[in-house]
Amino acid sequence: MNKTIAVLGLGLFGSAVARNLAQSGVEVIAIDLNMDHVDEVLDCVYHAVQADFTKIDQLKAAGVESADIAIVATGEKLEVTILGIMNLKKLGIQEVIVKTKNISYKEVLLKVGATRVILPEVEMGIRLSNELSATSVLDSFELDEKYHLVEINVMESWIGKSISELDLRNIHGMNIIAMKTQKSDNYNPQVDPEYIVKEGDIFLLFSENKAVNHSLDV
């Protein structure tokens, strides 16, 4: 029997989770108050519906009671997230995963019924810092306590992908401000988004990721 997972909130994080789960064969019930967000995943998930997950009757109507796991993927307003968690627990959902941007909310969310609280920006920062620590950081320059420039050899996982595919800005909070290839001794600030990354390329990155700052000791 296929696992059913309810995804409540279809912003960038929620829609990405819903799509990837669906592509992996999971039956996804996707819910958002914004119909435009619902339309974006309508073609790929098991069931997508416009609903307010702070209203338990709307969750019931969407079939959320049948879910094995629920993911509250908004994380913007604490009171909204808490209401969502409480409704899910009333419906008998045993595993409730909650996304938040505020680390101070974690203890509260666990106390009201979340079984796991994730902080995507923190976790991505840790993941990226681990990747970068395994690569050759050629140089770094601190602009202030929040921002820095880092010169690195491209990571192995980037090779063979286009600049646009890497989507470093949205995924890692980093911008490529210039790059240098093996064929050139100089940096080129004109970065083609369709350029395919090759071994030996060097990127000059602008970063505002504090986790990376700390891991690089810059």
Image (cartoon, helix red, strand yellow):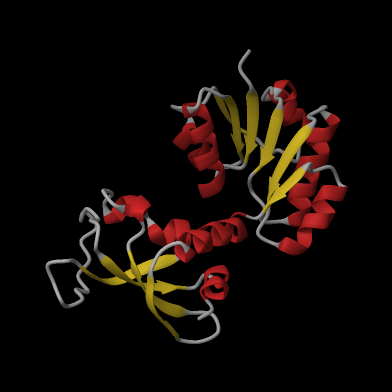
Q: Could you say which is closer to the camera, residue 149 or residue 55?
A: 149
- Residue 185 on image: x %, y %: 15, 76
- Residue 169 on image: x %, y %: 41, 62
Which residue is found at the position 45% from the left and 37% from the top? 40
Residue furthest to the top? 1
Q: Could you say which is closer to the camera, residue 43 or residue 126?
A: 126
Which residue is found at the position 50% from the left and 81% from the top? 218
Q: Quadrant of residue 132?
A: bottom left
Q: Is residue 196 left or right of residue 150?
A: left
Q: Quadrant of residue 70?
A: top right
- Residue 1 on image: x %, y %: 63, 12
Which residue is found at the position 48% from the left and 40% from the top? 36
Q: Could you say which is closer to the camera, residue 76 or residue 146?
A: 146
Q: Is residue 43 above or below residue 145?
A: above
Q: Is residue 35 above or below residue 142?
A: above
Q: Is residue 71 left or right of residue 21?
A: right
- Residue 19 on image: x %, y %: 49, 34
Q: Could you say which is closer to the camera, residue 4 or residue 45?
A: 4
Q: Is residue 107 left or right of residue 141?
A: right
Which residue is found at the position 64% from the left and 49% from the top? 74
Residue furthest to the left? 183
- How many numbered marks have been drawn onto this rendered protein structure? 0
